[in-house]
Image (cartoon, rainbow, N blue to C red):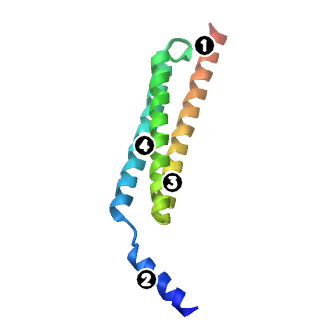
């Protein structure tokens, strides 16, 4: 049906991608990324300073609240981009977020393993 093709083309031209919305979502993704990495840094620093590597309740609450806020912002921004049919921005921002957070998790796990190895060596020698 040729009439439907013209209607679909007119509808596509009437609804371009919202660039301001995409910019706002990119800012939300980047702020969430920084909050997540800051939470990881707090955890690494707290484990190094705390006796036996345990977290105080305040540090644990701070860590969890940063991660929760980051998750809420990323999910909300992802929903906005999906509703706006901006799949390029949604995909690229999500991939960047997952890659950088994945690197942060690897660093966090390596640090935890290093601290555990140091404590094991100290107990064995002492």
Residue 94 is tagged as 3
The disc, 4 or 1, on the residue closer to the chain's N-terminal end is: 4
The disc, 2 or 1, on the residue closer to the chain's N-terminal end is: 2
Q: Residues within 10 Å of mark 2 (few under 14, many from 20)?
A: few
Residue 65 is tagged as none
Where is mark 1, residue-wise? 122
- Using the numbered discs, state the Cα–Cα distance from disc 3 to disc 1 in whole angstroms: 42 Å
Mark 2 touches mark 3? (CB < 8 Å): no
User: For residue 113, what is the image quadrant?
Assistant: top right
Q: Is residue 21 above or below residue 29?
A: below
Circle 2 or circle 1, nearest the eye: 2
Q: Residues within 10 Å of mark 3 (few under 14, many from 20)?
A: some
The disc, 2 or 4, on the residue closer to the chain's N-terminal end is: 2
The x, y position of residue 60, in whole percent, is 50, 22
Is 24 left, or right, of 6 in this rendering? Answer: left
Where is mark 4, residue-wise? 32
């Amino acid at each position: 049906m040729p009439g439907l093709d013209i209607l679909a083309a007119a509808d596509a031209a009437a609804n371009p991608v919202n660039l301001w919305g995409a910019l706002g979502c990119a800012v939300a993704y980047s702020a969430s990324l920084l909050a997540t990495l800051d939470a990881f840094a707090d955890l690494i620093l707290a484990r190094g300073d705390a006796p036996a590597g345990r977290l105080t309740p305040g540090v644990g609450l701070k860590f969890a609240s940063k991660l929760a806020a980051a998750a809420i912002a990323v999910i909300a921004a992802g929903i906005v981009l999906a509703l706006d049919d901006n799949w390029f921005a949604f995909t690229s921002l999500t991939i960047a977020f997952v890659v950088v957070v994945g690197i942060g998790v690897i660093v966090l796990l390596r640090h935890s393993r290093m601290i555990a190895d140091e404590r094991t060596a100290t107990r064995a020698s002492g």
